[in-house]
Image: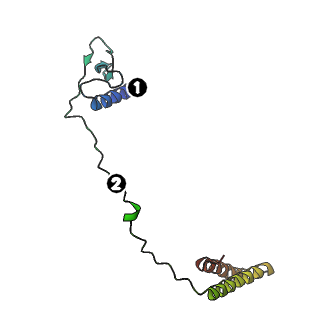
Amino acid sequence: MRAKACIVWISAICAASVYPGGVSAATGRAIFRCDLNGVPTFSDRPCASAAERYEPDPIATNTYEPPPTAPAPSPAALKPSSRKTAAPAAPDKHKETCERLAQGLKDTRAKQRAGYKAKEGERIKERQARLKSQLRLARCS
């Protein structure tokens, strides 16, 4: 019961703060305040014989005004990226590098299939990860 009274009270305060003069926007009716079992209750119709019309004080009502938003910059106004891209290497040298890295990766996979001890296996995994990273950085497909 108390939670329901609080919800009614809050909704009445919100309606009164948005629409001063104690008039509900949805119905155009006045807002009434009653004390039911010691709990202040707000309603759009008299809830007790001692109900009184409630008119909120506009000075004491809290409001929120959002800050102004700036318009989004046009794509032409945006600066070009300052990120430098690597100059493409000579096609022959790039191909040679990619082949060397791919061959190294094939060799590590062959070693994994052949069998190895635990310590050697860790080195093979590290080399494989390093070769994969180099292949990605070199943009080999």
Density class for disc 1 (Cα within 10 Å; few <14, some 14-19, many ≥20) is few
Closer to us: mark 1 or mark 2? 2
- Indicate the quadrant containing the C terminus: top left, top right, bottom left or bottom right: bottom right
Q: What amino acid is found at the position of numbered circle 2 in the picture?
A: Pro
Res 35 quadrant in image: top left
Density class for disc 2 (Cα within 10 Å; few <14, some 14-19, many ≥20) is few
* SS state under label 2: loop
The disc placed on residue 71 is 2
In front of the other: 31 or 4? 31
Residue 125 position (above or below residue 35): below
Task: Identify the residue at image location x=25%, y=17%.
Answer: 52
* Image position, residue 65 (x, y; %): 28, 43
Which residue is farthest top?
49
Horizontal placement of 98 versus 10: left or right?
A: right
Q: What amino acid is found at the position of numbered circle 1 in the picture?
A: Lys
For marks 1 and 2, give the CA distance. 43 Å
Which residue is farthest front?
76
Label 1 belongs to which residue?
4
* Image position, residue 72 (x, y; %): 37, 56
- Indicate the quadrant containing the N terminus: top left, top right, bottom left or bottom right: top left
